[in-house]
Amino acid sequence: MPDQKSAPEQGAHMAAARREALLSQISEMSRRAGQSDAPTTIAVSKTFAADRIRPVLETGHIDFGENRVQEAADKWQALKEDFPHVRLHLIGPLQSNKTGQAMALFDAIHSLDRPKLARAIAAERDRTGHCPALFIQVNLGDEPQKAGVTTAELPALLALSRDTLGLPVVGLMCLPPATAVPAPYFAKLNNLATAHDVAHLSMGMSGDYKQAIEQGATHIRLGTAFFGQRS
Ligand SMILES: *Cc1c(COP(=O)(O)O)cnc(C)c1O
């Protein structure tokens, strides 16, 4: 058949079509919500192998999210050589002993959540002269199993990170409780960001990004909506 495409070509074509449809839907949602700019869409590639990520990179997509440092290092060291302009976002918890590795690989860390980690990041920044953009993760639902500072702990962590250590805290991040109506949590994160003069809001996943956009998300983190179901 004359128009038969090879598997990689077909993958690239599907990735491009899917991304284009998703991004145009996001910009329409954003316009309707009265936001002046569409949010940055982070394609969450956790669990997907490099051969699934490559076609998305070929569309020109820039922002990708991973939740594990080691998995990200294994996949992205090679991918970054071919796509050096990519921006990687760490969206999962960070152990202090992986700070150096994470800071070398990621352009943004969305999971700053404790003083010990802020100090480890600052020490590494002093050593290398380099620091990714940082988001403080807030555990708005006070869920014991979830990472993040409580709302009560936020001012102290901000003061330590931003004022004392001089770290580039650019935003707040949250994951609302899985079974809750998310909009009030997103609104609360927005209020906290305003109250503390923090510019960016990392909130909204495949199931709730519309609500997050309505509440002013600047970074949405989309896994399944971008890549399909994870196995
Ligand atoms: C996996 C993950 C996402 C993406 O989840 P989807 O529901 O697949 O969009 C977003 N944020 C965090 C912190 C995640 O771990």
Image (cartoon, helix red, strand yellow):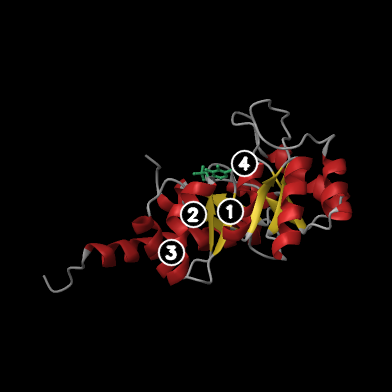
Which disc number belongs to residue 101?
1
> Which amino acid, by three-letter code, is at mark 3?
Leu
Q: Can residue 212 be seen from the camera position used here?
A: yes
> What amino acid is found at the position of numbered circle 2 in the picture?
Ala
Question: Of 105 and 199, which appears nearest the observer?
Answer: 105
Q: Residue at x 63, y 41 (%)?
A: 95
Q: Classify 190 as above or below 168.
A: above
> x, y percentage for residue 143?
68, 27
| Label pair 2/1, CB-CB below 8 angstroms | yes
- Find numbered disc 1 in the image and state the secondary structure of the residue it sits on: helix
- First along the sequence among labels 1 and 4: 4
Look at label 1 and name its amino acid: Gln
Name the residue beneath numbered marker 4.
93
Question: Which residue is identified by label 2?
Answer: 73
Ligand 1 placement by image quarter? top right
Q: Is residue 218 left or right of residue 76?
A: right
Q: Residue at x 87, y 43 (%)?
A: 155
Residue that carries the numbered disc 3 in the rendered image:
79
Instruction: Check the image and report above or below for 140 versus 70.
Output: above
Label 4 sits on what residue type? Answer: Pro
In the structure shown, which secondary structural element does the residue marked by tag 2 occupy? helix
Judged from the image, the secondary structure of the residue bearing numbered disc 4 is loop
